[in-house]
């Protein structure tokens, strides 16, 4: 078994000619054609297992290869990989170490072999070279140009890959960061297999929601933190393509959730994270979140306006004009968000986060090492108790109608909700489901109240004498809805407070 540690980027076509001259040592690239056919069952059992099986032709060689997703450690993405020469050059999964694959990934290739058939193919020319960095780290650089095809449907393939051969992943990430701006690179979260499945199975292109981190009770706090950060980053990257190219606003929403979960995780694990080492990352995360916030605000406001308020108030000519203005503003905000995600600054941020988790220098202090060695269950109990205490203290003698105090509580509840999700698998389960359900109810009500406050602010920018009546009607609807939610908030908060805690 080989553990593949690889960065994958989309590469502009006009940048390919500059690639080899700006790499360290300006290496000479070799060129070869690679044709691969991917196999799966009719119900896509391999895809469901986050795995891929292919037969590749590389010159005169025919190679069977099985790859499967591997839980990362917060840095460079990694996959498990097995290869073997194909039997008589044909589809022959039995040449792979099937028992080892089943033990590692839960996929029984022998049992599935007779049910599998070709599902899509890749055809591309690969130019590749090995680079050696100053510290001796060796990485393979590959530039792939071709197509991914499923039946009569095909899409172009134009990618740059950096694969670690030997040495420091942090050094390879530093190389990647230096290439982003001169080559216009954009991280590609999808493997070639995932792109192929996207051609034949629409569900593969759905927005990626937060995945429960794979924590084991035997983990220490540092291992848990790196796994959680890896999951948060995967959620961000998994929604980038949809945010850039699809109309569904849920991609942007889930991408922003991933960013918020990242920031929340770094706060939750503050005892392991010296502020001086992580401050540049958190500052950049906050700036990116702010640049995307406008698009999400206009998405929520437009839906609220078109699906609820306009129906209640009636589609008068004034309301139609107001809806049109809101739609124009929403489109402009989306364009700004996409520009922010396509920027070199955002690409470097994601690489910076990976590099920070790969770099062990910030873990050198004795205080950090003690906190990192704590069992994840004990660390989680302490973290949740602290976050819960902060929220309860803030809500003492609270005026639920005060929007400033309410907004601060919303932030504290959100941090507690994310942390509860991080640690839920490692903590006692009695009462956990009810605790989380009631906490989610509190978060939902606080979130809608925030949406109403934002709607009022955005409405001020749309109003003028030509639609004064429509604006007044919307303001009335917002005020009534806010009153209902404020009353409900006290009820759901009291219900959550009565619920037994995790510990």
Image (cartoon, rainbow, N blue to C red):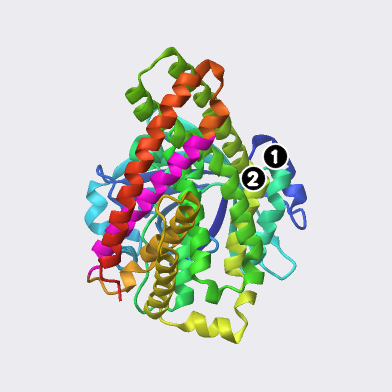
Is there any visible trace of residue 201 in the rendered image? no
Of residues 192 and 9, which is closer to you in this image?
A: 9
Q: Position of residue 467 (x, y in %)?
A: 50, 18
x 72%, y 54%: residue: 178
Viewport quadrant of the N terminus: bottom left
211 vs 177, left or right, is: left
Mark 1: give few (<14), some (14-19) or many (20+) Cα within 10 Å.
Answer: few
Q: Is residue 188 above or below residue 384?
A: above
Q: Is residue 356 above or below residue 297?
A: below
The residue that mark 1 highlights is 15
Range shown magenta? 431-457
Disc 2 and disc 1 in contact, CB within 8 angstroms:
yes
Of residues 247 and 485, which is closer to you in this image?
A: 485
The residue that mark 2 highlights is 185
201 vs 359, left or right, is: left
x 44%, y 55%: residue: 410
Q: Earlier in the sequence, mark 2 or mark 1?
A: 1
């Amino acid at each position: 078994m080989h553990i593949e540690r690889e960065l994958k980027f989309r590469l502009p076509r006009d940048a390919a000619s500059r690639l080899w001259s700006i790499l360290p040592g300006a290496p000479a690239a070799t060129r070869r054609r690679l044709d691969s056919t991917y196999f799966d069952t009719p119900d896509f059992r391999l895809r469901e297992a986050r795995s891929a099986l292919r037969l590749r032709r590389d010159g005169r060689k025919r190679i069977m290869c099985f790859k499967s997703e591997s839980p990362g450690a917060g840095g460079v993405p990694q996959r498990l990989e097995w290869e073997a020469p194909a039997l008589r050059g044909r589809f022959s999964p039995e040449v792979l170490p099937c028992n080892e694959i089943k033990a590692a990934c839960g996929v029984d290739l022998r049992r599935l072999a007779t049910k599998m058939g070709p599902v899509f193919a890749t055809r591309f020319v690969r130019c590749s070279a090995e680079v050696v960095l100053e510290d001796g780290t060796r990485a393979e650089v590959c530039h792939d140009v071709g197509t991914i095809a499923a039946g009569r449907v095909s899409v172009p393939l134009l990618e740059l890959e950096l694969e670690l051969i030997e040495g420091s992943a942090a050094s390879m990430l530093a190389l990647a960061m230096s290439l982003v701006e001169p080559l216009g690179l954009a991280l590609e979260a999808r493997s070639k297999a995932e792109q192929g499945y996207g051609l034949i199975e629409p569900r593969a292109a759905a927005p990626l929601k937060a995945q429960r981190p794979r924590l084991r009770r035997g983990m220490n706090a540092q291992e848990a933190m790196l796994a959680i950060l890896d999951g948060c980053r995967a959620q961000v990257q998994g929604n980038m393509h949809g945010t850039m190219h699809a109309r569904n606003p849920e991609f942007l929403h889930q991408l922003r959730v991933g960013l918020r979960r990242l920031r929340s995780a770094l706060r939750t694990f503050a005892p392991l994270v010296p502020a001086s080492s992580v401050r540049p990352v958190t500052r950049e995360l906050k700036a990116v979140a702010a640049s995307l916030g406008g698009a999400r605000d206009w998405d929520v406001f437009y839906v609220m306006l078109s699906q609820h308020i306009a129906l209640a108030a009636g589609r008068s000519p004034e309301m139609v004009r107001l809806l049109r203005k809101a739609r124009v503003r929403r489109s402009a905000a989306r364009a700004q968000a996409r520009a922010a995600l396509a920027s070199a600054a955002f690409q470097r941020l994601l690489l910076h986060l990976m590099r920070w988790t790969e770099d062990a220098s910030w873990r050198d202090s004795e205080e950090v090492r003690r906190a990192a060695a704590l069992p994840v269950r004990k660390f989680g109990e302490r973290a949740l108790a602290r976050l819960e205490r902060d929220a309860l203290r803030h809500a003492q003698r609270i005026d639920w109608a005060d929007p400033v105090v309410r907004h601060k509580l919303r932030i504290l509840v959100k941090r507690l909700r994310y942390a509860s999700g991080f640690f839920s698998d490692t903590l006692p389960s009695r009462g956990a489901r009810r605790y989380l359900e009631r906490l989610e109810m509190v978060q939902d009500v606080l979130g809608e109240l925030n949406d109403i406050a934002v709607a009022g602010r955005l409405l001020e920018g749309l109003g003028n004498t030509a639609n004064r009546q429509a604006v007044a009607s919307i303001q009335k609807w917002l005020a009534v809805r806010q009153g209902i939610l404020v009353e409900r908030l006290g009820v759901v908060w009291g219900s959550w407070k009565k619920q037994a805690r995790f510990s």
